[in-house]
Image (tube, helix red, strand yellow):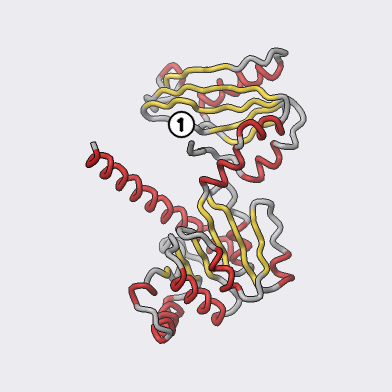
Amino acid sequence: MKLRNLMKIQDFNLIEKISSKIILIKLIDVKGSSPREKDTNMCIYKNGQFGTIGGGELEYRTIKEAKKMLSEKNEINKILEFPLGPSLGQCCGGYVKVKLIKFSNGKQLMNKNKLKEELIENNKNLYIFGAGHISKAIIEKLDGTGFNVFVIDSRQKIISEINYNFVTSILAKEPKLIIKNIPSESYCLIMTHSHKIDLSICYSLLKMKDFSYIGLIGSKTKKIRFTKKLQEMGLNKNLINKIECPIGITGIKGKEPDIIAISIIARLLEFKSSLENKYKHLRLIKGSKNG
């Protein structure tokens, strides 16, 4: 099952601590156009909610029913059906079936549904080499974007400042040595404090495995210089061209760390979506040939 929701790793950590009754809301069937996909989840408890099933009247009525369930003594689960038409004030034109499941507390919900594990399994791995100011600006915006985040740096003080429970921090005297343990198809961003280290990481990434994405922070001039040096180190230009530099969305201008971070994250999401669409298209072609 592919988990689809806006809940984050941090949300799941908070859900586990909820000691009161909590409702898990799941879209168990979706036909036609709808605000969210099948298997989307959200949670409702006395003092708030986590995630969304798409907002609007659909979500409003579902939350109303969930709050009613919280006040009831019985443990009966419910299924709601919604045609997304004029009667609901939504013009999507689709149909949604929603299941509401009641749990005694957040820990019980998490243990029985493995939501956190499914999210991690379906996320893509993102390895960020360097924990400087741009990295920090990127990291703080990444939770909930579909990546398992790993940050590598050789500086004890700098890496110790990365304090997010959805991030794995790795102290490595030689960051390039970490690469042999990185799964293929991972996403990699290179933004250390040293061009020499950047070059070493670029070389090791290109030599070792076929990664989904390699992005190097820097200018077009840096890319030209690195291309020349990597060729001198024995790599061919086609392989070197797998490195994207500069990184980010070309239409987003600005040198402020937060703007650069948003631009880079937007590019990662754009690339990830295009790759997923490509694989989906290939599966459809393969399926039609087999059929």
Locate residue 109, reporting x and y percent: 66, 30
Which quadrant holds residue 167? bottom right
Closer-to-camera residue (223/262): 223
Which quadrant holds residue 259? bottom right
Residue 36's place in the image compared with 229, above or below, is above
Locate residue 139, reporting x and y percent: 61, 58
Direction right: furthest residue: 19
Locate residue 93, reporting x and y percent: 37, 24
Closer-to-camera residue (35/177): 177
Which quadrant holds residue 103? top right
Amino acid type, callout 1 = Lys
Q: Is residue 152 left or right of residue 46?
A: left
Q: Residue at x 33, y 73 (%)?
A: 238
Mark 1: few/some/many CA within 10 Å (<14, 14-19, 20+): many
Q: Is residue 277 left or right of residue 186?
A: left
Closer-to-camera residue (180/63): 180
Residue 77's place in the image compared with 281, above or below, is above
> Exactly how many numbered labels are in the figure?
1
Residue 253's place in the image compared with 12, above or below, is below
Q: Residue at x 69, y 42 (%)?
A: 13
Name the quadrant of the C terminus.
top left
Closer-to-camera residue (193/99): 99
Q: Residue at x 72, y 26 (%)?
A: 46
Locate residue 233, reporting x and y percent: 43, 84
Q: Which residue is mark 1?
A: 38
Direction bottom: furthest residue: 232
Q: Secondary structure at mark 1?
A: loop
Q: Residue at x 75, y 27 (%)?
A: 20
